[in-house]
Image (tube, grey):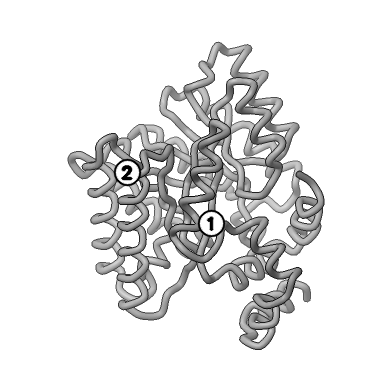
Amino acid sequence: MLRAAFIALSESRSLRAIAERSSFGQKTSSRFVAGTQVADAIRAAEAVNQFGAGVSVDNLGENVTNADEAKASAQLYHHLLDEIALRKLNANVSLKLTHMGLDVDEGMARELVRGLVAKAAAMSPRNFVRVDMEGSPYTQRTLDFVHELHRTPGNAGCVGAVIQSYMRRAEADVEKLLSERIRIRLCKGAYKEPPEIAFQKKAEVDASYVRLMKTLMKSGTYHGLATHDEAIINQAKAFATREGVPRDAFEFQMLHGIRRDLQQGLVREGWRMRVYIPFGTEWYPYLLRRLAERPANVLFIAKNLLRK
Protein backbone atom coordinates (compact mmCIF):
# COMPACT_ATOMS: atom_id res chain seq x y z
CA MET A 1 0.00 0.00 0.00
CA LEU A 2 2.77 2.43 0.92
CA ARG A 3 4.67 1.58 -2.25
CA ALA A 4 1.64 2.33 -4.42
CA ALA A 5 1.07 5.58 -2.58
CA PHE A 6 4.64 6.80 -3.11
CA ILE A 7 4.51 5.89 -6.81
CA ALA A 8 1.29 7.88 -7.18
CA LEU A 9 2.85 10.84 -5.38
CA SER A 10 5.94 10.72 -7.60
CA GLU A 11 3.74 11.04 -10.70
CA SER A 12 1.68 13.98 -9.44
CA ARG A 13 2.70 17.20 -11.16
CA SER A 14 0.67 19.38 -8.79
CA LEU A 15 2.21 17.85 -5.67
CA ARG A 16 5.65 18.09 -7.25
CA ALA A 17 5.13 21.83 -7.82
CA ILE A 18 4.02 22.28 -4.19
CA ALA A 19 6.93 20.24 -2.84
CA GLU A 20 9.50 22.13 -4.89
CA ARG A 21 8.17 25.46 -3.57
CA SER A 22 7.71 24.38 0.05
CA SER A 23 10.32 25.06 2.71
CA PHE A 24 10.28 21.41 3.78
CA GLY A 25 10.77 20.23 0.21
CA GLN A 26 13.63 22.65 -0.31
CA LYS A 27 15.22 21.63 2.99
CA THR A 28 14.94 17.95 2.16
CA SER A 29 16.28 18.32 -1.37
CA SER A 30 19.12 20.62 -0.33
CA ARG A 31 20.24 18.10 2.29
CA PHE A 32 20.37 15.10 -0.03
CA VAL A 33 20.68 16.65 -3.52
CA ALA A 34 23.41 19.16 -4.37
CA GLY A 35 21.16 21.36 -6.53
CA THR A 36 19.78 21.44 -10.05
CA GLN A 37 22.76 22.63 -12.13
CA VAL A 38 26.25 21.37 -12.94
CA ALA A 39 27.65 24.37 -11.05
CA ASP A 40 25.81 23.20 -7.91
CA ALA A 41 27.33 19.74 -8.17
CA ILE A 42 30.80 21.18 -8.72
CA ARG A 43 30.49 23.42 -5.64
CA ALA A 44 29.40 20.44 -3.55
CA ALA A 45 32.29 18.37 -4.93
CA GLU A 46 34.80 21.09 -4.07
CA ALA A 47 33.48 21.23 -0.49
CA VAL A 48 33.80 17.46 -0.11
CA ASN A 49 37.31 17.48 -1.58
CA GLN A 50 38.28 20.11 0.97
CA PHE A 51 37.77 17.72 3.88
CA GLY A 52 39.76 15.03 2.08
CA ALA A 53 37.14 12.83 0.42
CA GLY A 54 36.59 12.01 -3.23
CA VAL A 55 33.29 12.38 -5.08
CA SER A 56 31.12 10.54 -7.58
CA VAL A 57 28.65 12.87 -9.30
CA ASP A 58 25.30 11.60 -10.57
CA ASN A 59 22.87 13.60 -12.70
CA LEU A 60 19.45 12.51 -11.48
CA GLY A 61 17.22 10.88 -14.01
CA GLU A 62 16.29 7.49 -15.41
CA ASN A 63 13.97 5.87 -17.95
CA VAL A 64 14.06 8.75 -20.42
CA THR A 65 11.38 8.49 -23.09
CA ASN A 66 13.06 9.87 -26.21
CA ALA A 67 16.42 10.12 -27.93
CA ASP A 68 16.77 13.87 -27.43
CA GLU A 69 16.57 13.48 -23.65
CA ALA A 70 19.18 10.73 -23.72
CA LYS A 71 21.57 12.74 -25.87
CA ALA A 72 21.13 15.79 -23.64
CA SER A 73 21.94 13.65 -20.60
CA ALA A 74 25.11 12.36 -22.23
CA GLN A 75 26.18 15.88 -23.21
CA LEU A 76 25.74 17.01 -19.62
CA TYR A 77 28.09 14.23 -18.48
CA HIS A 78 30.66 15.39 -21.03
CA HIS A 79 30.36 18.85 -19.48
CA LEU A 80 30.80 17.37 -16.01
CA LEU A 81 33.98 15.55 -16.99
CA ASP A 82 35.33 18.77 -18.52
CA GLU A 83 34.62 20.70 -15.32
CA ILE A 84 36.22 18.01 -13.18
CA ALA A 85 39.38 18.18 -15.29
CA LEU A 86 39.43 21.99 -15.40
CA ARG A 87 39.13 22.29 -11.62
CA LYS A 88 41.38 19.30 -10.91
CA LEU A 89 38.77 17.71 -8.66
CA ASN A 90 39.03 14.31 -7.03
CA ALA A 91 35.80 13.24 -8.70
CA ASN A 92 34.34 10.75 -11.13
CA VAL A 93 30.82 10.23 -12.51
CA SER A 94 28.02 7.73 -12.09
CA LEU A 95 25.25 7.15 -14.62
CA LYS A 96 22.26 4.95 -15.30
CA LEU A 97 21.82 3.22 -18.63
CA THR A 98 18.12 4.08 -18.76
CA HIS A 99 19.11 7.76 -18.43
CA MET A 100 21.19 7.25 -21.58
CA GLY A 101 18.16 5.86 -23.42
CA LEU A 102 18.39 2.10 -22.87
CA ASP A 103 14.59 1.79 -23.05
CA VAL A 104 14.41 3.97 -26.16
CA ASP A 105 17.21 2.63 -28.34
CA GLU A 106 19.75 0.25 -26.82
CA GLY A 107 22.25 0.81 -29.61
CA MET A 108 22.12 4.56 -29.09
CA ALA A 109 22.49 4.20 -25.31
CA ARG A 110 25.52 1.98 -25.71
CA GLU A 111 27.13 4.43 -28.14
CA LEU A 112 26.53 7.37 -25.78
CA VAL A 113 28.09 5.53 -22.86
CA ARG A 114 30.99 4.29 -24.97
CA GLY A 115 31.76 7.91 -25.79
CA LEU A 116 31.76 8.92 -22.13
CA VAL A 117 34.01 6.05 -21.05
CA ALA A 118 36.40 6.79 -23.92
CA LYS A 119 36.53 10.43 -22.83
CA ALA A 120 37.23 9.46 -19.20
CA ALA A 121 39.98 7.07 -20.31
CA ALA A 122 41.63 9.74 -22.47
CA MET A 123 41.74 12.37 -19.73
CA SER A 124 44.93 13.23 -17.85
CA PRO A 125 44.78 11.98 -15.21
CA ARG A 126 42.45 9.23 -16.40
CA ASN A 127 38.95 9.41 -14.98
CA PHE A 128 36.29 6.80 -14.25
CA VAL A 129 32.64 6.10 -15.12
CA ARG A 130 30.52 4.04 -12.75
CA VAL A 131 27.56 2.35 -14.44
CA ASP A 132 24.87 2.24 -11.75
CA MET A 133 22.70 -0.80 -11.18
CA GLU A 134 18.96 -0.46 -11.63
CA GLY A 135 16.11 -2.90 -11.03
CA SER A 136 16.44 -6.60 -11.84
CA PRO A 137 15.03 -6.33 -15.40
CA TYR A 138 18.25 -4.47 -16.28
CA THR A 139 20.79 -6.46 -14.27
CA GLN A 140 22.15 -8.82 -16.92
CA ARG A 141 22.23 -6.24 -19.71
CA THR A 142 24.02 -3.78 -17.45
CA LEU A 143 26.70 -6.27 -16.39
CA ASP A 144 27.19 -7.55 -19.94
CA PHE A 145 27.75 -4.01 -21.16
CA VAL A 146 30.21 -3.19 -18.38
CA HIS A 147 32.23 -6.29 -19.29
CA GLU A 148 32.16 -5.23 -22.95
CA LEU A 149 33.24 -1.67 -22.12
CA HIS A 150 36.06 -2.84 -19.87
CA ARG A 151 37.44 -5.16 -22.57
CA THR A 152 37.61 -2.31 -25.09
CA PRO A 153 41.28 -1.38 -25.61
CA GLY A 154 42.21 1.61 -23.45
CA ASN A 155 39.18 1.38 -21.14
CA ALA A 156 40.46 -1.05 -18.50
CA GLY A 157 40.25 0.54 -15.06
CA CYS A 158 38.05 3.41 -16.29
CA VAL A 159 34.62 1.79 -16.01
CA GLY A 160 33.03 -0.12 -13.16
CA ALA A 161 29.85 -1.81 -11.99
CA VAL A 162 27.56 -1.88 -8.97
CA ILE A 163 26.63 -5.07 -7.11
CA GLN A 164 23.68 -5.21 -4.73
CA SER A 165 24.24 -7.66 -1.89
CA TYR A 166 20.55 -8.49 -1.51
CA MET A 167 20.52 -10.14 -4.94
CA ARG A 168 20.96 -13.91 -4.70
CA ARG A 169 23.09 -13.83 -7.85
CA ALA A 170 25.54 -11.30 -6.39
CA GLU A 171 28.28 -13.77 -5.48
CA ALA A 172 28.44 -15.21 -8.99
CA ASP A 173 28.39 -11.73 -10.52
CA VAL A 174 31.24 -10.61 -8.25
CA GLU A 175 33.31 -13.64 -9.20
CA LYS A 176 32.90 -12.89 -12.90
CA LEU A 177 33.70 -9.18 -12.49
CA LEU A 178 36.78 -9.94 -10.41
CA SER A 179 38.05 -12.36 -13.06
CA GLU A 180 38.49 -9.29 -15.28
CA ARG A 181 39.58 -6.97 -12.45
CA ILE A 182 36.56 -4.72 -12.89
CA ARG A 183 36.04 -2.23 -10.10
CA ILE A 184 32.87 -2.75 -8.05
CA ARG A 185 30.74 -0.55 -5.85
CA LEU A 186 29.11 -2.84 -3.30
CA CYS A 187 25.79 -1.70 -1.85
CA LYS A 188 22.89 -3.45 -0.15
CA GLY A 189 20.23 -2.56 -2.75
CA ALA A 190 17.23 -0.25 -2.65
CA TYR A 191 14.82 -1.67 -5.23
CA LYS A 192 11.89 -3.85 -4.25
CA GLU A 193 12.64 -7.32 -5.61
CA PRO A 194 10.78 -10.63 -5.14
CA PRO A 195 12.11 -13.25 -2.69
CA GLU A 196 12.92 -15.64 -5.53
CA ILE A 197 15.81 -13.42 -6.61
CA ALA A 198 16.60 -11.27 -3.57
CA PHE A 199 17.09 -11.75 0.16
CA GLN A 200 14.27 -10.11 2.12
CA LYS A 201 15.55 -10.18 5.70
CA LYS A 202 18.02 -7.54 6.86
CA ALA A 203 20.20 -10.17 8.52
CA GLU A 204 20.52 -12.08 5.24
CA VAL A 205 21.31 -8.92 3.25
CA ASP A 206 23.91 -7.86 5.82
CA ALA A 207 25.53 -11.30 5.89
CA SER A 208 25.76 -11.31 2.10
CA TYR A 209 27.26 -7.82 2.15
CA VAL A 210 29.96 -8.79 4.65
CA ARG A 211 30.89 -11.95 2.71
CA LEU A 212 31.22 -10.02 -0.54
CA MET A 213 32.98 -7.13 1.19
CA LYS A 214 35.75 -9.41 2.44
CA THR A 215 36.15 -10.93 -1.02
CA LEU A 216 36.50 -7.49 -2.59
CA MET A 217 38.95 -6.22 0.02
CA LYS A 218 41.28 -9.18 -0.58
CA SER A 219 40.96 -9.13 -4.39
CA GLY A 220 43.79 -6.71 -5.17
CA THR A 221 41.44 -4.52 -7.26
CA TYR A 222 40.27 -1.13 -5.98
CA HIS A 223 36.62 -1.28 -4.93
CA GLY A 224 34.07 0.89 -3.10
CA LEU A 225 32.13 -0.21 -0.02
CA ALA A 226 28.91 1.80 -0.12
CA THR A 227 27.24 1.70 3.29
CA HIS A 228 26.21 3.92 6.19
CA ASP A 229 25.98 0.93 8.54
CA GLU A 230 28.52 1.60 11.29
CA ALA A 231 28.59 -2.03 12.39
CA ILE A 232 29.61 -3.13 8.90
CA ILE A 233 32.08 -0.26 8.57
CA ASN A 234 33.70 -1.36 11.81
CA GLN A 235 33.89 -4.93 10.53
CA ALA A 236 35.60 -3.68 7.37
CA LYS A 237 38.13 -1.69 9.37
CA ALA A 238 38.88 -4.65 11.64
CA PHE A 239 39.19 -7.02 8.67
CA ALA A 240 41.58 -4.67 6.87
CA THR A 241 43.75 -4.41 9.97
CA ARG A 242 43.71 -8.15 10.66
CA GLU A 243 44.38 -9.20 7.06
CA GLY A 244 46.91 -6.50 6.28
CA VAL A 245 44.77 -4.82 3.61
CA PRO A 246 46.26 -1.34 3.00
CA ARG A 247 43.97 1.60 3.71
CA ASP A 248 44.48 2.89 0.17
CA ALA A 249 43.43 -0.43 -1.39
CA PHE A 250 39.68 0.33 -1.18
CA GLU A 251 37.32 3.14 -0.24
CA PHE A 252 34.18 3.65 1.79
CA GLN A 253 31.32 5.38 -0.01
CA MET A 254 28.34 7.30 1.37
CA LEU A 255 25.56 9.49 0.07
CA HIS A 256 25.67 13.28 0.08
CA GLY A 257 23.95 14.53 3.24
CA ILE A 258 24.03 11.19 5.08
CA ARG A 259 26.27 10.84 8.14
CA ARG A 260 28.61 13.69 7.30
CA ASP A 261 30.09 13.28 10.77
CA LEU A 262 31.02 9.67 10.00
CA GLN A 263 32.39 10.60 6.57
CA GLN A 264 34.75 13.17 8.04
CA GLY A 265 35.69 10.88 10.92
CA LEU A 266 36.79 8.12 8.56
CA VAL A 267 38.92 10.59 6.59
CA ARG A 268 40.57 11.79 9.80
CA GLU A 269 41.38 8.17 10.67
CA GLY A 270 43.16 7.75 7.35
CA TRP A 271 40.55 5.72 5.47
CA ARG A 272 39.58 6.56 1.90
CA MET A 273 36.11 8.00 1.46
CA ARG A 274 34.01 8.90 -1.60
CA VAL A 275 30.74 10.83 -1.39
CA TYR A 276 28.03 10.14 -3.96
CA ILE A 277 26.60 13.52 -5.00
CA PRO A 278 23.30 13.57 -6.93
CA PHE A 279 22.06 16.74 -8.62
CA GLY A 280 19.44 17.79 -11.15
CA THR A 281 15.85 18.85 -11.56
CA GLU A 282 14.52 15.32 -10.97
CA TRP A 283 14.97 15.42 -7.19
CA TYR A 284 11.25 15.13 -6.32
CA PRO A 285 10.45 12.01 -8.37
CA TYR A 286 13.88 10.62 -7.46
CA LEU A 287 13.24 10.79 -3.71
CA LEU A 288 9.68 9.51 -4.01
CA ARG A 289 10.74 6.56 -6.15
CA ARG A 290 13.42 5.68 -3.61
CA LEU A 291 10.72 5.65 -0.93
CA ALA A 292 8.42 3.57 -3.16
CA GLU A 293 11.14 1.01 -3.67
CA ARG A 294 11.74 0.68 0.05
CA PRO A 295 9.25 2.53 2.33
CA ALA A 296 11.52 1.94 5.34
CA ASN A 297 13.71 4.68 3.82
CA VAL A 298 11.22 7.23 5.22
CA LEU A 299 12.60 6.74 8.72
CA PHE A 300 16.18 6.65 7.41
CA ILE A 301 15.82 10.03 5.67
CA ALA A 302 13.97 11.57 8.63
CA LYS A 303 16.77 10.59 11.02
CA ASN A 304 19.42 12.11 8.78
CA LEU A 305 17.57 15.42 8.49
CA LEU A 306 18.09 15.76 12.24
CA ARG A 307 21.73 14.76 12.48
CA LYS A 308 24.92 16.39 11.28
Tell me the amino acid under the disc marked 2. Ala
Q: Which mark is residue 53?
A: none
Q: Is residue 169 visible?
A: no
Looking at the rendered image, the quarter that the N terminus falls into is bottom right
Residue ID at (61%, 52%): 189
Q: Is residue 279 above or below residue 204?
A: below
Residue 16 location (% of width, % of height):
65, 80
Q: Is residue 36 left or right of residue 203?
A: left
Local crowd at mark 1 within 10 Å, few (<14), some, or many (≥20)? many
Q: Nearer the viewer, mark 1 or mark 2?
A: 2
Q: Which mark is residue 85?
A: 2
Q: Earlier in the sequence, mark 1 or mark 2?
A: 2
Q: Is residue 114 left or right of residue 73?
A: left
Looking at the rendered image, the quarter that the C terminus falls into is top right
* Dot 1: element: strand
Could you say which quadrant of the image residue 5 lies in?
A: bottom right
Q: Nearer the viewer, residue 86 or 246?
A: 86
Tell me the amino acid under the disc marked 1. Pro
Residue ID at (77%, 59%): 296
Local crowd at mark 2 within 10 Å, few (<14), some, or many (≥20)? some
Q: Is residue 249 above or below residue 57?
A: above
Residue 98 location (% of width, % of height):
42, 67
Seen from this angle, which residue lies furthest bottom?
Answer: 14
Residue 191 location (% of width, % of height):
61, 60
Residue 281 location (% of width, % of height):
52, 71
Q: Nearer the viewer, residue 81 or 8?
A: 81
Residue ID at (33%, 71%): 72
Q: Nearer the viewer, residue 75 or 161?
A: 75
Q: Is residue 161 left or right of residue 282?
A: left
Residue identifier under label 1: 278
Could you say which quadrant of the image residue 260 lies in?
A: top right
